Image: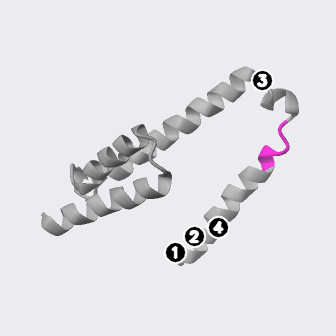
Amino acid sequence: MSMWAGVLIASALVYSWKLLGHLVPEKYVSNPNIRSLATLLTVGMLAALVGVQTFTSADGVTFDARAVALLVAAGLFYLRVPFIFVVIAAAAVASLLRLWF
């Protein structure tokens, strides 16, 4: 199986789960406990994704330009800078650090 066939199959499976989500009865979706759990799971999964993508490589755990760019992005978000400028600044920091080191 080619890589693109795998991507298309995975996309179809993920989309089918999204469609199945519309079949969940309203009483479960409107439950405040379920809503808070869904919010916490979303934040936890996003934090895990950022951590894995920032601090790991093929060789194991690493600390490189991505970590510094993440710190820059976090600082700019704390200062409430618009998202596009955060992305540009973090990308510039990461690329300059990789260029110089």
Which quadrant would residue 40 be assigned to in this image?
Answer: top right
Disc 2 residue type (three-letter): Gly
As measured in the structure, the alpha-carbon distance from the residue carrying label 2 to the one carrying label 3 is 36 Å
Name the spot of residue 73 as percent of width and height, x first: 37, 48
Question: Tag 2: Cα neighbours inside 10 Å, few (<14), some, or many (≥20)?
Answer: few
Q: Which residue is mark 2?
A: 6
How far apart are labels 4 and 3 at the CA level? Answer: 33 Å
User: Which amino acid, mark 1?
Assistant: Met
* Disc 2 + disc 4, Cβ < 8 Å: yes
- Left or right of 61 in this view: 73: right
- Write down the residue under mark 1: 3
From the viewer's perspective, tell me whether residue 89 is left or right of residue 14. Answer: left
Q: Which contiguous range is marked in magenta? A: 20-24
Q: Look at the picture and state if 9 lies above or below 1.
A: above
Q: From the image, give the main secondary structure of the stretch colored magenta.
A: loop
Q: Position of residue 80 (x, y in %)?
A: 46, 41
Q: Which residue is mark 3?
A: 31
